[in-house]
Amino acid sequence: MIGGVLLVCLVLYLVPRTAVFGAVLLTGYLGGAVCTNMRAELPLWGYVLSPVYTGVLVWLALYLRSTALRRLVRGGD
């Protein structure tokens, strides 16, 4: 079930029209991974923050491939 949810989020992220929605869903999914790793008391740098790094990469990649998102972040027209 968890893998299916991740697959749906990934497909939404890869389709250009729904990429922002997919990125938001992936961010929530990765937030759950952070909470799970913290609850299991895993090491901070190796396990807990790796989903954070992945989320940053997801948004960075979306920023680089979407001109509309770049315009929105920069505050331009």
Image (cartoon, rainbow, N blue to C red):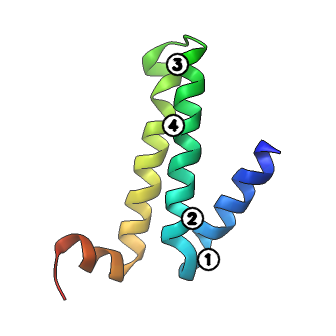
Residues under numbered marks 3 and 4 in contact, where contact means CB atoms less than 8 Å apart:
no
User: Mark number for residue 15?
Assistant: 1
Residue 67 versus residue 64 in the image, above or below: below
Q: Earlier in the sequence, mark 3 or mark 4?
A: 3
Gap in angstroms between the C-alphas marked 3 and 1: 32 Å
Q: Which residue is mark 2?
A: 22
Q: Residue at x 16, y 76 (%)?
A: 75
Around disc 4, counting alpha carbons within 10 Å, would you say few (fewer than 14), some (14 to 19), or many (20 or more)? some
54 horizontally vs 64: left or right:
right
Element marked by disc 3: helix
Residue 64 versus residue 52 in the image, above or below: below
Q: Identify the amino acid type marked 3.
A: Met
Gap in angstroms between the C-alphas marked 4 and 1: 22 Å
Element marked by disc 1: loop
Instruction: State the image coordinates of residue 12 (x, y, percent, origin top left).
Output: 63, 69
Give the image quarter of residue 13: bottom right
Instruction: State the image coordinates of residue 55 (x, y, percent, origin top left).
Output: 46, 47
Gap in angstroms between the C-alphas marked 3 and 4: 12 Å
Instruction: State the image coordinates of residue 67 (x, y, percent, origin top left).
Output: 34, 82
> Which quadrant does the C terminus fall into?
bottom left
Q: Earlier in the sequence, mark 4 or mark 1?
A: 1
4 horizontally vs 30: left or right:
right
Q: Residue at x 80, y 52 (%)?
A: 4
Please tell me which residue lies in front, 27 or 57. Answer: 27
Gap in angstroms between the C-alphas marked 2 and 4: 16 Å
Q: Identify the amino acid type marked 4.
A: Pro
Instruction: State the image coordinates of residue 23 (x, y, percent, origin top left).
Output: 51, 61
Around disc 2, counting alpha carbons within 10 Å, would you say few (fewer than 14), some (14 to 19), or many (20 or more)? many
Gap in angstroms between the C-alphas marked 1 and 2: 9 Å
Q: Which residue is mark 3?
A: 38
> Which quadrant does the N terminus fall into?
top right
